[in-house]
Amino acid sequence: MPELDSKHILLGITGGIAAYKTPALVRLLRQAGAEVQIVMSASARHFVTPTVLQALSGLPVRDDLWDGGAEAAMGHIELARWADLVLVAPATADVMARLAGGRADDLLTTLCLATPAPLWLAPAMNQGMWRHPAVQRNRQRLVSDGVLLLGPDEGEQACGDTGPGRMVEPEAILAAISAPSATPTETEQILLGLNVLITAGPTVEAIDPVRYISNHSSGKQGYAIAECAAAMGAEVTLVSGPTRLDTPVGVTRIDVQSARDMHDRVHENIAGQDIFIGVAAVADYRPAAAADQKIKKQGDAADHTLILTENPDIIASVAALPERPLIVGFAAETELAEEHARQKRQCKGLDAIVVNDVSKAQIGFNSDYNSATLIWEQGEVTLPFQGKEALSRQLLEQLMSVFGMRLTVPPGALGPT
């Protein structure tokens, strides 16, 4: 991977069971051409030994802020300047709290505060800890400070629980940090003063009181965009179909079920919005008439015909408004993705569209990772494989780069258009 060739990566390891994955991560980073300097917390030594890590990295492992020999030459500042990228994997709830609070009480947190390099965290903890409001507040603070989070993944955990909190696999970490343009740019509050309306998740179209038509959307990409937009200063309204996700900090959430519900709530809230981003996977069709009672099976030989009718096209209806915001659509495709997206943008009258190929492994529905192409009338740009939060940040930055003048200059200031 040429993006990591000769790069200086400072790998921080903290005290979680996922530390057992770090030798494999070090090996992958070295194979990609990176130089790896490891800094361990005191607790990390209980899960993986410095001897193993030194053998794999080829450099002495650092773990003590009060190392007399290294600190005689201000070694922690030297390391902070040496790093091209700082990666903490695993990042425990404790280290996230300390970094969110700006603490520097050991070598690793001191380096994270002192370095000018991008900081990436791969959280790993019990699912209950990850869901705790305090951890989510710290997560939001870190994101707003420009820290990039990789995961966590969902699945079975060492304690026997199942849920979010697993550290992402070393291969996925390598892919994310080595993607072109993976280094974040300065965002500050570039959406300050703007109102942003976002749709996310699936819609649910009732067949009867028990069954429904829906799709595989998890809502993760829409929620990540909402979270990043709020961190960048926007007033964010999120109209969400059914998901298992927590409401991002600082975001106003409106829950809906069906496409018609979503259509109505969007139009009730569209006035005064500067940007509308339609991320939701809205069902194109619904049953023409939902049964009042559960439809019973009528015998092995009986067929049942379900008559469908078309749902309202939410994003096209917003585009048709006489006073409309900037409109950005999403398209999940399985073939000829960019060609179909260009046609969709023109047909629906959108300012821009984001398309991804959901037939590819590791991206799209239910994944914490994505890659996409942003297309507008005058051009397009690739958003490489990375975590959905990082991709959201790049997307919003790109939208402001392309359309920012239109959004921030008072109406009429540029003369007739």
Image (cartoon, rainbow, N blue to C red):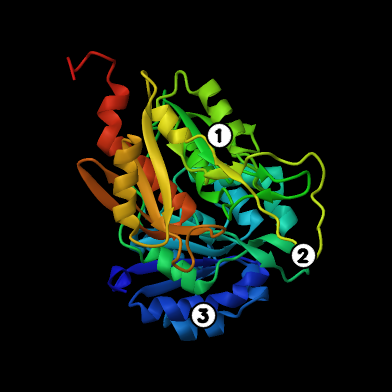
CB under 8 Å between discs 2 and 3: no
Q: Quadrant of the C terminus?
A: top left
- Is 182 in front, or is 262? 262
Mark linked to residue 238 = 1
Residue of label 3: 24
Mark linked to residue 339 = none
Residue at the image point whose x is 38% and y is 38% from the top: 328
Tell me the quarter of the picture where residue 164 sits.
Answer: bottom right
- Is 409 situated left or right of 208 in this image? left
The local crowd at label 3, few if under 14, some if 14 to 19, many if 20 or more residues have their Cα within 10 Å, is some
Q: Is residue 222 above or below residue 177?
A: above
Q: Earlier in the sequence, mark 2 or mark 3?
A: 3
- Is 155 in front, or is 295? 295
Q: Earlier in the sequence, mark 2 or mark 1?
A: 2
Q: Is residue 355 above or below residue 336?
A: above
* Eye-nearest disc, 2 or 3: 2
Q: Secondary structure at mark 1?
A: strand
Q: Secondary structure at mark 3?
A: helix
Percent position (x, y) of residue 178?
A: 36, 66
Percent position (x, y) of residue 144?
A: 48, 41
Q: Amino acid at mark 2?
A: Asp
Residue at the image point whose x is 48% and y is 50% from the top: 389
- Outermost residue on the front side: it is 301
Residue at the image point whose x is 75% and y is 41% from the top: 291
Residue of label 2: 161
Disc 2 and disc 3: Cα gap in Å? 24 Å
Q: How many marks?
A: 3
